[in-house]
């Protein structure tokens, strides 16, 4: 619609200030027909100086950000998964290493691969569970520190 | 009425439960260390719980005490912020 109208306007000046210009009543206000660069810059400068510029005319970085939910941080979900995997994995590794104890002789064999893996499991299970629990508690601390009382 | 932070309440609960639970699990588990002669086998379920307690008691104690220390730090920070906001008398 505006495109047709724009052809009837003088392209040297902003169409909004020319007779016959009608603002469409849409959610997304239509951009005025692009005038020549000099006229557009001048109009924008005047509006900015008088504080009459509409919010949609502001540059994206100047417009106020839209209100969104509570901090949709993708890393937070990753951390929850990381914590759960560490806790469950640590317990599972400990049980596996303990079970391996009864399936082989402790005297013969020396340093075999199962024994090395068993030692690694015993060494890793404690820190894994500790860091997993600490990650979960840390995420709760993050919630507690960003909490604000409802109005 | 001032609203309390529910996350801090949850963290206090978690910290205390972790410390008390881990300590209790350790004490319970230690009763199996030197069984008197003739004591029957506790069974697979108790054996599983014993192994679980053995795995979890150390990390739970560490994280529980760490949680309580972190909460005290958080309360100290909030107290300092309130103190700086108040006008000087």
Image: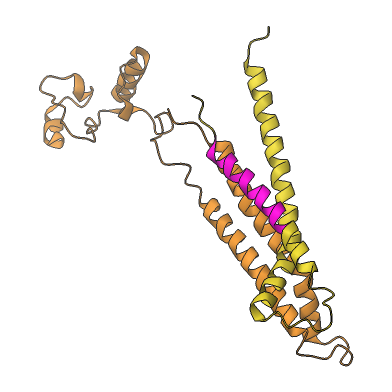
Q: Is residue A36 above or below residue B14?
A: above
Percent of width and height locating residue B73: 71, 36
Which residue: 68% across, 39% down?
A: B71
Percent of width and height locating residue B84: 66, 18
**How many numbered marks are there?**
0
Which residue: 58% across, 41% down?
A: B9
Main secondary structure of the magenta stretch? helix
Q: Give the left or right position of residue A17, taking residue A66 as reference.
A: left
Percent of width and height locating residue B25: 72, 62
Which residue: 74% across, 55% down?
A: B61
Q: Which chain is yellow?
A: B
Residue A73 falls inside the magenta stretch: no
Q: Residue furthest front?
A: B38
Q: Is residue A108 above or below residue A35?
A: below
Nearer to the camera, A99 or B85: A99
Snapshot quadrant of residue A33: top left
Q: Which residues are magenta?
A: B5-22
Which colour assignment does the render follow? Answer: by chain
Snapshot quadrant of residue A14: top left
Which residue: 63% across, 49% down?
A: B14
Is the C terminus of chain B in the top left, top right, bottom left or bottom right quadrant? top right
Q: Is residue A122 above or below residue A31?
A: below
Q: Give the left or right position of residue B67, taking residue A111 as reference.
A: left
Percent of width and height locating residue A7: 14, 32
Q: Which chain is orange?
A: A
Nearer to the camera, B21 or B31: B31
Q: Give the left or right position of residue A52, taking residue B11 as reference.
A: left
Q: Give the left or right position of residue A81, taking residue B57 as reference.
A: left
Q: Is residue A73 above or below residue B57?
A: above
Q: Residue furthest top?
A: B89
């Amino acid at each position: 619609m505006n495109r047709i109208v724009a052809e009837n306007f003088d392209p040297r000046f902003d169409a909004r200030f020319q007779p016959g210009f009608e603002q469409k009543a849409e959610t997304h206000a239509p951009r005025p027909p692009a005038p020549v660069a000099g006229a557009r810059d001048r109009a924008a400068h005047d509006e900015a100086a008088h504080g009459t510029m509409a919010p949609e005319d502001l540059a994206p970085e100047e417009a106020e950000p839209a209100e969104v939910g509570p901090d949709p941080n993708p890393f937070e979900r990753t951390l929850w998964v990381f914590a759960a995997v560490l806790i469950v994995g640590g317990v599972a590794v400990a049980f596996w290493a303990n079970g391996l104890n009864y399936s082989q002789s402790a005297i013969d064999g020396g340093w075999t691969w199962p024994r090395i893996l068993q030692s690694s499991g015993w060494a890793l299970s404690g820190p894994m569970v500790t860091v997993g629990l600490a990650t979960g508690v840390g995420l709760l601390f993050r919630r507690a520190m960003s909490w604000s009382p409802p109005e | 009425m001032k609203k309390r932070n529910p996350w801090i309440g949850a963290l206090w609960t978690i910290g205390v439960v972790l410390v008390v639970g881990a300590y209790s699990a350790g004490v319970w588990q230690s009763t199996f260390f030197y069984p008197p002669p003739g004591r029957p086998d506790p069974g697979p379920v108790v054996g599983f719980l014993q192994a679980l307690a053995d795995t979890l008691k150390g990390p739970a104690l560490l994280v529980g005490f760490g949680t309580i220390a972190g909460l005290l730090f958080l309360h100290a920070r909030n107290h300092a912020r309130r103190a700086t906001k108040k006008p000087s008398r």
